[in-house]
Image (cartoon, grey):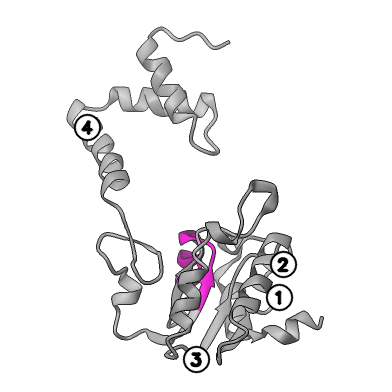
Amino acid sequence: MDQYPSKLIEDAVNAMSSLPGVGKRTALRLVLNLLKREPGEVENFATAFTRMRNEIKYCTQCHNIADVDLCAVCADTRRDTTVICVVENLRDVMAIENTLTYRGVYHLLGGIISPMDGIGPADLNIDSLVSRVGTGHVNEVILALSATMEGDTTNFYIFKKLSGIDVKITTIARGVPVGDELEYTDEVTLGRSIANRIMYENNLAR
């Protein structure tokens, strides 16, 4: 068991190491770095995280993270609102935006269907997607979920939910390797996968 000279340092290390990918040694190094800084600087550091947690909003239209009711993408009048790209989370939005090739809008599910993790359709933002598409103002829905079993399951569920609505449903081309997360795909490959998207029915036939 690690021995710390101070219970305060131990508590800080435990809190820091609770973050994903941060081990005890890395946490201790970060804590000791904070300890060297001016009190005001550390307070600003803590305040930034507290404000983020307490004041962050979720876009009332697409569920993206935002500072106000509408996220920057949904509020941008230059975006094509007739095309909705369905993604798992904010990291996927950032990955696609970095390609500089997509000009439609998004819909964040907040996860993917994963029975092993206890996540079902009711836990995701699927009903609000159906409502958006059901307005009749959407021409295309792009299914851009990770090429995993859970991603494919979620794609198929959404496809079935939208099957009674007159809308084109496409999926990104398999330039994204099977089993890969979108956020780890390079911008060129991801951009091409979106540009070369195919009809979802054709993907089912493969």
Q: Can residue 98 be spotted in the picture?
A: no
Say which of 174 and 185 sits in front: 174
Q: Position of residue 51 (x, y in %)?
A: 25, 44
Q: Nearer the viewer, residue 166 or 8?
A: 166
Q: Which residues are magenta?
A: 85-97
Amino acid carrying label 4: it is: Glu
- In the rendering, at what x and y percent does residue 99 appear? 49, 74
Q: What residue do we see at 34% from left, 75% from top?
A: 74
User: Residue at horizontal 80%, vertical 83%?
Assistant: 205
Q: State the residue position of label 2.
A: 177
- How packed mark 3 is, by other alpha carbons closer than 10 Å (few <14, some 14-19, many 20 or more), is some
Mark 4 is surrounded, within 10 Å at the Cα level, by few (under 14), some (14 to 19) or many (20 or more) other residues, namely: few
Q: Are marks 1 and 4 in contact (CB under 8 Å)?
A: no
Label placed on residue 43: 4
Q: Is residue 5 left or right of residue 200?
A: left
Point out which mark residue 174 bears: 1
Residue 139, label in figure: 3
Q: Earlier in the sequence, mark 3 or mark 2?
A: 3
Q: Position of residue 57 (x, y in %)?
A: 30, 57
Label 3 sits on a secondary structure element that is: loop
Percent of width and height locating residue 165: 56, 88
If you read the primary sequence from the N terminus, does the residue marked by circle 4 or circle 2 appear first?
A: 4
Which of the two discs, 3 and 4, labels the residue nearer the N terminus?
A: 4
Quarter of the picture holding the N terminus: top right
Question: Dots 2 and 1: beta carbons under 8 Å?
Answer: yes
Q: Quadrant of residue 9?
A: top left
